[in-house]
Amino acid sequence: MKIDLNADIGEGFGRWTIADDAALMRVISSANIACGFHAGDHLIMDRVVRAAKEHGVSIGAHPGLPDRMGFGRRTMVVSAEEMEAMLAYQIGALKGIAARYGVRVGHVSYHAAFGTMANADQDLADRLARVIAQIDPDLVMLAMEGQPIDLAARKAGLRVRSLFLADRAYQANGALVPRGLEGAVIHDLDKVRWRVKQFLETGSVTTIDGKSLLIHSRSILVHSDTPGSDKLAQAIATQIKAIGGEIAAAEG
């Protein structure tokens, strides 16, 4: 069984770093690269793309809102037209750097509030998915199953790679528990490891209210700003291999 282990990566700025990107790159199969809005810059993007090529890691764009102070996790009052332009701008920036190294941008994964806003508005999700399809219809959308981003991508003719978020609490309807609510983010690494074990063995996760939720996914996401994210990624990789799995990027 092939399992994609992907991480949001390159989320520093200038001399500031938020995670050990080099350590993560040695473990993951797919990198969601920050494109300069919520985090990242031209030099970081360049370095991460080169490292991904060296380690045989698939790369994708990780577009967010232009809010470095809030790490792209605060919603903004912006028009749909502006979000469409933000999306195209960020994907284009990464494609330019990737082209320099002969690397293909293979997927798109929205960051934080950018994705939250899309998942709260099906029309917005549809518009953004059409932008991606216009740029490159072969791009794969990373999304949670059954949510507006997932549905929009399929309507636009894009392939979808369904995600399991190991360090985020789920609601019974399959949506994430909103950040800011108690228990929304799981910081205890042992608990995260247990959730991954449950997911790998049963294909399910226990929701915030104690129910069992089926997760149809072969892709596990690690947030790089989770403390110890490199150690968490290594632990997950060990768990995948322990069940006879192979860590490899999937196209959808």
Image: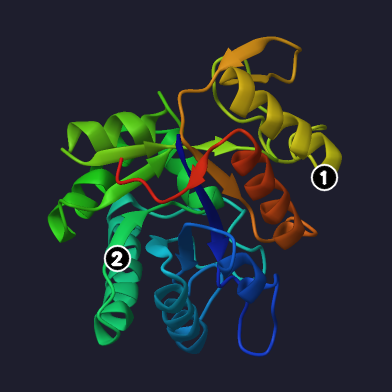
- Vertical placement of residue 135 versus 120, above or below: below
Please, is residue 149 above or below residue 238 in the view? above
Please state if 181 lies on the left or on the right of 130 as rendered: right
Picture quadrant where residue 100 is located: bottom left
Q: Pointers 2 and 1 in contact (CB under 8 A)?
A: no
Res 126 visible: no
Q: In this view of the protein, can residue 224 be seen by the observer?
A: yes
Tell me how many marks there are.
2
For the residue pair 242 and 26, the one nearer the viewer reads as 242
Which badge, 2 or 1, comes first in the chain's sequence?
2
Query: Where is residue 124 drawn, in percent x and y?
Result: 32, 40
Residue at 58% over, 68% down: 26
Residue 250 in the image: x percent, y percent?
35, 45
Which residue is denoted by mark 1 in the rendering?
189
Label 1 sits on what residue type?
Answer: Leu
Q: Write down the residue under mark 2.
A: 105
Query: What residue is drawn where x is 62% and y is 54%?
Result: 73
Q: Is residue 165 left or right of residue 189?
A: left
Quadrant (top left, top right, bottom left, bottom right) of the N terminus: top left
Q: Which residue is found at the position 54% from the left and 58% from the top?
A: 28
Q: Amino acid at mark 2?
A: Val
